[in-house]
Amino acid sequence: MTVREPMPSGGRFSVLGLAPYLVLGLVSLPLIILFGWLLYSSFFSRMEGLTPIGGFTLDNWRFLWNPNSVQQLAGRSIWVLTFNTFIFAISVALLVVLISSMAGYALSRLAFPGRRTFLSGVLILHSFPSVTLLIATFIVLRSIGLFDQLLGVILVKAAFEIPFGVWIMKGFFDTVPWELEMAALVDGAGRVRTWWRVMMPLVKPGILALGLLSFVTGWNEFLLPFIFMPSGSQETLSTLVRSILGEGRFVDYGLLTAVGLYYVAPILVLFVLAQDQLMRIYGGGVKG
Amino acid sequence: MVGQEQAMPSARFSAISGFWRNHGTALFFMLPALVVTLVLFLAPAIITLGLAFTDTATATGLSRWEWIGWANFEQLLRSSFTSIILRNTVFYVSTTLALNIALGLGLAILSVHVREGPGRFFRALWLLPRITPSVVYALMWVWASASPPFGIINQVLAPFGVEPRAWLSTDPWLIVIMINGFVGASFGMIVFTSAIQSIPEDLFRAARVDGASAWQIVRRITLPLLRWPILFVFVYQAMSLLASYEYILLTTDGGPGLYGTEVWSLWAFHTALNSYYGNLQFGLGAAMATVLVLIGIVVSASLLRLFHFGSLVSEPRVEIS
Amino acid sequence: MSARRSWMASAIPLSLIFAMSACSTTPSPAEEGSADPSGSAAAPAPEPSAVVETRTSETITEGDVVTLRAWTIGPDAPSFYRRDNLIDAAAALNEELEAEGSDQRVVVEASFESGGAWADYLQKVTLAAESGQAPDIVLAGHENMAPWASAGYLVTLDDLLAQYPDAFADVIPRLWDAMKLQGVTYAIPQDTEARPMYYRKDLLAELGWSEEDIESLPDRVRSGEWTMQDLVQTAQEAVEAGVVDEGKGWYHRPTKGHDHYMFYYANGGRMQDPESGKLVITRDALEKHFQLHYDAVNTWNITPKNFLGSDFRQWHETVTSGTVLFANAGTWTWAEWINTYEVPEEEQWENVGFTLIPAAEPGGEPTTLSHPLVYMVTEASENQELAFRLLAKATTPELNSRHSVESAHLAVLTSQIDDPTYAEDEFLAAASYMSEYTNFIPNHPDYGAYDEVIFRFLSAVQAGEMSPAEATEAAIQELQAQLGDELIVE
């Protein structure tokens, strides 16, 4: 089992020298300016375009050390909100990964009736804009008694992600040569044991990618907890961003940029750390 | 690389004696996904289809609604907005898609061909629009495109003789397409980058030995081998764009003028979920969603055809009873 | 072939990953300034208030204790008395119950939501009502009664009002119009506001107006002597004389909202038929309304091009920079300019004046528009009468005035005008007369659809995409297509 190395770079296009850098830089310029400006403006109270009004200030970042000064925090610590958001996102990610890799394994390895229907069915479900399903989802949640329950919100969020998780994991299981699995099965291990002990470690890149992306969608989720768990929905970072945004007219823009940056930072770090892995999965994971 | 056809033919392996046991195992593995998908995805989808034939709204609640047959669809046919918004949708999806793919492809090719460090930097940079909270990302553009003295687009372009303006009002599509195109570019970028990296290095080496220029290599080797990923991204992104509305909502909200940038999914959202007078027209919104789903099914049908769906869902090769 | 296959095997899953993350982003219905149903101020709250902060009145151990739950919202933070007034009313109600010899005592558990999006709050109330978790009392905009009462979530209050005739005798009579759906009362007013026309005194002086002319403007508007035609002419003069830049003669609301209907009302438009409760569109008034907005941009250059849909924050920054001659906004805006945009209060008094919206033409009536927020009692409440009586105790000159002053809202009780807290607020005292000239948006379940159509055609007219006559016809046609029998065209 070898993992394909990222393509050695450098030398290949040395002829062109700086040209690709120039083009890349130029195309990326809008993003560099926009995000650079976002970071820059979080250190000033007001901006007129690129020109700060007033002097350098850390005031926009005060939510980190002085929660009482930020009305929308209502005296709670930013760390508590961060922790809650983390818990929600990690629950969604774990659930999606577990359920998807179980189903993905069966879809990849077992023949059973309804298999094709399931695979094509979930693709069609994708064309429903998820937001139009909210009212129907409410009807269902109410009837099974999970309205206003954290479990209900996590399940709904996971349900929206699982069809795709299943497809992804099926794809990864497909790339695992059957000989590896067969050896285990011949040794007398059951299907479940083989799945857990042999197969799961082999599709780690898939688990990582799916887990990461489910985590991100959970991290950014606003509407589902807000609508489906009215009693405790105020406890996440997404609600904090939303409450600072408010109705547009009362926006403390400096605070919004700082909180927005804080909110996106963990995700960005995750992506940077995982980029190699994300790019590498492509080569087919395991060679047989 | 392992082709699937190398694997063993399967169906015969599952002898009749093992049929039930096998299905028991399959059921065990499928059960959680089945339950969650059926209860929280399929059931709501079916209920939504049903709602399309009712007058359900906040004003009827969930107990006072009535079946009204095709009335919602008839209203859509009658409305003078329908044609405007359909036109917008086609325009928005096609142009944004073109930008997505051009950007994704360009970024993938270039970022693979530069040194690893900068390549990673640029890829991370282009992931930013996708992972930034949509509210913050959209507002950033709103501020950037504002009229003087606020917007940075005007400030940056002023030296090039571009007349300052309120971009979201004067050129709404330009901004809307850029916003969405930049978010979508990362999708193509990652897929294409991975695809390029999976092209056997020998092919490039041989071409270089033959004295091919960089452009020739891209043109003759990379692009032809990217045909499938490009098609895939094309169709799949088309579906995602059909259902996407939130950046438009946060920037132009469908304006300026008479639905200048309103697209179908945004219209469904405005109708079914966002009314600050509090009467949400779930029935009509569900009818709109149904129309969108029909379009989506046509698009996904072409996706499945293009990608030989049959071979992707073919019976599993590893089957031991 | 083999290479392609194995490519596909991993391409599909990987692409799906990213497609998934592309498609599951959260919708964010909060548009710029889209929801100011309350019309509210931005004064900083004296103490940090929660996003949703729930408070409970004093614990009671004796007697038959009933807990009343209430949900309220700002979304502006300074409106927290919407919650606190209910909590403080508990003591008064308990005293009264004790005096009656009743065993019952109430504990009030009320929440106040600040910052959040209005549409989401409404959604939450609706879903709570559907799942049997609605609180006893809900605060929302008066027009929300239309869908909620139709759906059976609300209690009619007429019997209770008859049973306790003194409880709300003091409410400004005109407000009751907005509390009814087809003649039935469903709500109690909590606060109200008005939407004046602000003008720059310094710019008018620059234009050669005498101080007397400037100071008497509100009275001349009130008497109907100075009309919208004069406003347009003055704005044009100011542009021509270079006192203001082109497009800065008159700023109206830059986004969707109730404010636009003031100009429709001023032209004699009607929105609802009091008899049948149906929505009304007055063809002639609609065309005049469109014509005014068309000309302001395309003929007179007193309002900027591409105005509708622009940013509210920048609107305020431009207006507070003192370069716009006329700007119509809310009474709450006065405080917002001082607090959020840091205009010194004295300077604002010196340079900015406010009047009613002038009559459309000589012989017409000046006007304004209010959007009262209201308390409603839910059908699900097991203690409807107690909830109603709690509202009575929360509606007093003292409690309402402290709310008015804290959040810059106008009085809902006639006795508030004499309340010392209220009278001390110079601006509120000076703007109170506007309530006499006010109009409301209709209480009708289809008002949202109606407003959407009118607003989109107004945008088309201002953008110069359609002539006012074309837009009027097209709007009426679309309204008829969408509303059918629920619309009267006159």
Image: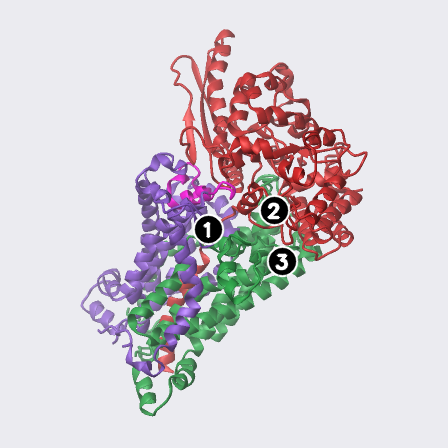
Chain colours: A purple, B green, C red
The crowd level at tag 3 (other Cα within 10 Å; few <14, some 14-19, many 20+) is many
Q: Was residue A234 drawn as part of the magenta stretch in this picture?
A: yes
Q: Position of residue C452 (x, y in %)?
A: 65, 47
Residue displayed at 38% across by 37% down: A70
Q: Which residue is mark 1?
A: B135
Total number of numbered labels?
Answer: 3
* Nearer to us in this view, C429 or B31: C429
Instruction: Specify whether A39 is left or right of C353.
Output: left
Please, is residue A25 above or below residue C165 in the view?
A: below
Circle 1: residue type: Val
Q: Position of residue A24 (x, y in %)?
A: 40, 71
* Nearer to us in this view, A215 or B288: A215
Q: Was residue C327 drawn as part of the magenta stretch in this picture?
A: no
Of all residues, the one furthest to the left in this rendering is A187
Could you tell me if the residues under marks 2 and 1 are in contact, i.e. CB atoms within 8 Å? no
Numbered badge on residue C148: none
Q: Position of residue A100 (x, y in %)?
A: 35, 59
Mark toward the viewer: 3 or 2: 2
Residue range in magenta is A225-251
Earlier in the chain: of badge 1 and badge 3, it is: 1
Question: What element does badge 2 sit on?
Answer: loop
Numbered badge on residue B260: 3
Pointer 2 indicates a residue of which chain? C
Res. C436 in view:
yes
Q: Which residue is mark 2?
A: C254
Mark toward the viewer: 2 or 1: 2
* Nearer to us in this view, A267 or C347: C347
Quadrant including the C terminus of chain A: bottom left
Res. A158 in view:
no
Residue displayed at 41% across by 54% down: A38
